[in-house]
Amino acid sequence: MPDATAAANTATPPPTVRFAPSPNGLLHLGHARSALVNWRFARARGGTFLLRIEDIDTTRARPEFEAAIAEDLAWLGLDWVTPVRRQSEQFPDYEAALSELKKLGLVYPAFMSRAETARKVAEAEATGASWPRDPDGAPHYPGNDRGLSAAERRRRIAAGEPHTWRLDMEAALRGLPDPLSWTEHGTGPDGETGTILADPGAWGDVVLARRDVPTSYHLAVTVDDAVQAITDVIRGQDLFTATAVHRLLQHLLGLPTPRYRHHGLVRDPQGRKLSKSEGATSIAALRASGLSPSDVIALATQEAGMES
Ligand code: GLU
């Protein structure tokens, strides 16, 4: 007779998870950790492990980095279901989501450049005012153009003025029936776990479509997690606070909310998060130095809370 736990387990459909790197550099140990946690989670439960290439940043994404991602993952012994979803090939999906939000009146064309925004913030701060900052430390968008008339927006767009599309956060929050939350099966950076109240307002008017591409990280990841029927989003704790934005977009677009499982980051000896731009040692370099896949797996998973 199967015991109650086994019966409960068989009642839970197998999970679908994804590893979603950006092909703008070589993978490092932090990526290896994320990929391994996802792959092991799926494997232990008879689930599906997907690879998604987050290449909306067309100026930085390179085919040779995408090839290196596949090579590194295969060398580590991971396999994934194909075809791989490449975000640069899914722009119509993101445009459709953005146009839903336009219809709801929750997005606006934002014409201020980064430099103009910085100037405006500096001016305000020079008077002693404190300017709100998002969880990553970036100042909130001033939102001066939030109230432009429809005619004025049309005129400026038709005149070819560069603009992003931003979420009108206040309007989006005003329409919420209840506070939003998600279930955290891992931990946030401060040990948060269980039911987490989402605080998307902390991010201000986030960008949903950039100047050069019809989407942004937040919009693309939310749409893709739904399109790919991801049941469990497993990723580094650096994205824990961004989950609030994804949760809000799921609500606004009527998309399901996956379970979330954030994991600790691999840190350098100084305790800093590894980063491609800071030249963190790549998996390819570790391989070239003679380490075996199991050596690299051991380095990537130590202290990771790698229960599957
Ligand atoms: N593309 C993101 C990164 O490389 C990961 C996005 C996610 O897992 O939600 O950090």
Image (cartoon, grey):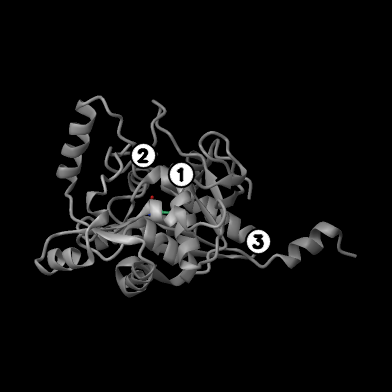
The residue most toward the left is 159
- Residue 159, percent across and down? 9, 66
For marks 3 and 1, the one nearer the N-term is 3
Checking the image for residue 45, the label placed there is 3
Relative placement, left or right, of 218 versus 162 is right
**Going 44% across and 48% down the picture, which residue do you hit?**
200
Viewer can see residue 79:
no
Identity of the amino acid at label 3?
A: Arg
Q: Nearer the viewer, residue 107 or 78?
A: 107
Q: Nearer the viewer, residue 256 or 48?
A: 256
The quadrant in which residue 120 appears is top left
Viewer can see residue 257:
yes
Dots 2 and 1: beta carbons under 8 Å?
yes
- Residue 148, percent across and down? 22, 58
Q: Secondary structure at mark 3?
A: loop
Q: Which residue is mark 2?
A: 136
**Going 32% across and 44% down the picture, which residue do you hit?**
285
Dots 3 and 2: beta carbons under 8 Å?
no
- Residue 180, percent across and down? 55, 52
The quadrant in which residue 193 appears is top right
Q: Which residue is mark 1?
A: 241
Report crowding for label 2: few under 14, some 14 to 19, many 20 or more residues within 10 A (C-alpha). few
Q: Nearer the viewer, residue 306 or 146?
A: 146
Q: Secondary structure at mark 2?
A: loop
For marks 2 and 1, the one nearer the N-term is 2
